Image (tube, grey):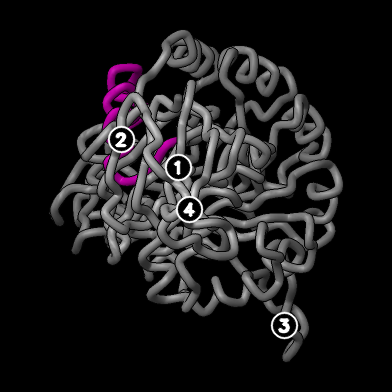
Amino acid sequence: MPDLLIKNVIIVLPDRVLEKMSVGVKDGKIVSLIPEDKRGDIEAGEIFDGEGGYLSPGFIDLHTHGLHEYEFDKGKDDVKSICSILPSYGVTGILAAVLPRPFGEDIRFIKSLSKEKYKGAEILGFFFEGPFLGLPGAIDPAALTEKTKERVEAMKNAAAPYRGIFAVSPEIENAPELISVMKANGNPVFITHTAADVKQTLAAIKAGAKHATHFYDVFPSPPETDSGVRPCGTVEAVLSDPEVSVDFILDGEHVDPVAVKMAMRCKDDNGVCLITDASLGAGLPPGVYSGIGGVEVEFAYEGAPARGTVNSPFPGGLAGSGLTMDKAVRNAVKWLGVDIPAACRMASLNPAAVLGLENSLGIIKEGYTANMVLLDKELNVQTTWIKGERWIR
C-alpha cells in the first residue's frame, strides 16, 4: 500500500503531459503512475485530490542567494528559513550560493553551514560564487584574491558532506589547473563573470567547466579590434559547444528573451536551465531592501531585478534578482513560447542533469525521488512534496 496517492492530476513529463492520472508514493519514492480509469479503489496512507492540476517535478534552483528577509551569507539560521520557505515557490532542491570572504574566514563560515541539516528544500550543494572570478559584477572586488588550488581543496573539504560547486572565469591565472581540482568527484564547474577570449574559454571547457551561470550577464563582448569584424568571446564559445549547458535569470531585464531563444536553438533539450539568482527581498512586495553584501537595493515590481539605490555603490545597476522559480516557469511559457513540459523541464530535469542527478530527480517516474509540485492552470503553486512529504497546501 502506498504512503501517498495523489489523484486527479495532469502529470508533466519532459516532453508531454499525461491527462487524468494518479501517482503513488512510498518511502519517499514514486512507485506508480496510474490512469484514473484504471485506478480502482486503491488504498493509501493519504489520498490527495489534485483537482485536475499539473503535477510537475519539483523545481531545482542552481543559483540563489536568498529570499524574503534571509540570505545564505548571514548564517545557518537564515539557511534554515530559506529552505523552509522555498517549497512555497515549488522549489525542492537548490545550490545555496555563498559569496567570497577572506581566506580562513571563508572556511570557518562554510563549516558552520555544512555541519547542519536542513528541512524543506534540499541543499544539493553549496555554490561558491568567488573568489575564482575575473570580473566582480556586484561582488566586492577586494574579496577576489588568493585563487589557488589549496583554497579550492580547503573550500571543498569545508563543504562536506555537501558538494562544493565552484564558479570560475576562464581568464584567471591557471584556470584549467584549478578546474581540474574543482571538478573532482563529478562536480560541475560553472563559467561566469568573465571577459575571456575564445581560446581561454575553450581551454576551460576542455578542462571540465561545462556549465555557464547567469549566462550573458557579466559576460561582456570583447572590444572590436578589426573594423567591421564582430569579435567572439566566451558567449560564442559556450553557445558553439553542445556539451556546455547554460542558465538564465528570466525576469525580462537581466537578459532579453530573444537571447534565450537563441541559446535554445544552439542547445539540445537538456541544455538550458532557469535560475533565480535571487537575493534578499525576492518574493516580497516591491520596495527597498538590504541586498547581497548589505548593499541597498530596490525592486520596482514583483519579480523585478534588484537594482542599486542612490545610496548604493552602483545606483541603478543590477545586483541580483527578485525572481522566484515558479514565476520563471510562467515567464518561460509567456516569453519563450514554449509549452508547459518544456518550461518545467528547464526548472527540473535540466538542472538535475547539470548536477548529474538526472537518474533520481527531475522526472515523475517510478523509482525517482518524490519531489513534486502541484500547479494550477495558471501555473501557480498549490502544493509541494519533498520526498513524499507535503510542505504546503
Marks 1 and 2 sit apart, C-alpha to C-alpha, by 10 Å
Marks 4 and 1 sit apart, C-alpha to C-alpha, by 9 Å
Q: Is residue 70 visible?
A: yes
Residue, disc 3:
230
Marks 4 and 2 sit apart, C-alpha to C-alpha, by 15 Å
Q: Quadrant of the C terminus?
A: top left
Instruction: Look at 74% across and 44% down and name the residue there.
Output: 209
Residues at marks 1 and 2 touching, judged by CB atoms closer than 8 Å: no
Where are the magenta residues, as a range?
A: 71-92
Secondary structure state at the residue bearing disc 4: strand
Give the mark nearest the N terminus, 3 or 2: 2
| Front of the two marks 3 and 1 | 1
Residue, disc 4:
35
Secondary structure state at the residue bearing disc 3: loop
Give the mark nearest the N terminus, 4 or 2: 4
User: What amino acid is found at the position of numbered circle 4 in the picture?
Assistant: Pro
Quarter of the image where one finds residue 237: bottom right
User: What amino acid is found at the position of numbered circle 3 in the picture?
Assistant: Arg
Q: Quadrant of the N terminus?
A: top left
Secondary structure state at the residue bearing disc 1: strand
Task: Assess disc 2: are there few (<14), some (14-19) or many (≥20) residues with their C-alpha within 10 Å of its C-alpha.
Answer: some
| Residue 23 circle label | 1
Instruction: From the top left corner, tell me how far across and down residue 356 is, in percent.
Output: 69, 38
Residue, disc 2:
47
Provide the major secondary structure of the magenta segment.
Answer: helix
Task: Assess disc 1: are there few (<14), some (14-19) or many (≥20) residues with their C-alpha within 10 Å of its C-alpha.
Answer: many
Instruction: Look at 86% across and 48% down and name the residue there.
Output: 206
Instruction: From the top left corner, tell me how far across and down residue 36 is, in percent.
Output: 42, 53
Give the mark nearest the N terminus, 4 or 1: 1
Residue 183 relative to residue 323: left or right: right
Instruction: From the top left corner, tell me how far across and down residue 344 is, in percent.
Output: 48, 57
